[in-house]
Image (cartoon, rainbow, N blue to C red):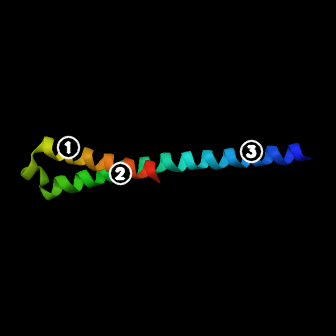
Amino acid sequence: MKCLKFRKRKQKEYLKIQSFKERQHLNIRMSRERMINRAKDLLMNGLIKKRGLSGCVDYLIADFKKLKEKLLQS
């Protein structure tokens, strides 16, 4: 009986970890989509005219790294 309870508890822990990993993967995918939409908005607003194309790309990469760090911390 104790063995079954132990197995069930371990299985629940494993499922919790798996669901967390899936949610984290989904969050990263959603953040990529948000980043792409943001890039389109920045292009439309004319940020490239101010920063140039490479400056705009650097800005977006830095913003994505910050977002990724926040996801990894939480």
**Residue at 39% across / 52% down in the picture?**
70
The residue carrying mark 2 is 67
* Label 1 SS: helix
Q: For label 3, count other residues whose C-alpha is less than 10 Å away and answer few (under 14), some (14-19) or many (20+).
A: few
**Distance of label 1 from label 2 (alpha carbons):** 15 Å
Sequence-wise first label, 3 or 2: 3
For this rendering, which residue is in front, 67 or 30? Answer: 67
Q: Which label is found at residue 57?
A: 1
Few, some or many C-alpha atoms within 10 Å of disc 1 (few <14, some 14-19, many ≥20)?
Answer: some
For the residues carrying marks 1 and 3, which lies nearer the camera in this image? Answer: 3
Q: Which residue is mark 3?
A: 10
User: SS of the residue at dot 3?
Assistant: helix
x, y percent for residue 43: 17, 52
Q: Please indicate whether residue 30 sits to the left or right of residue 9 in the image.
A: left
Callout 1–callout 2 Cβ contact below 8 Å: no
Residue kind at label 2, given as amino acid type: Leu
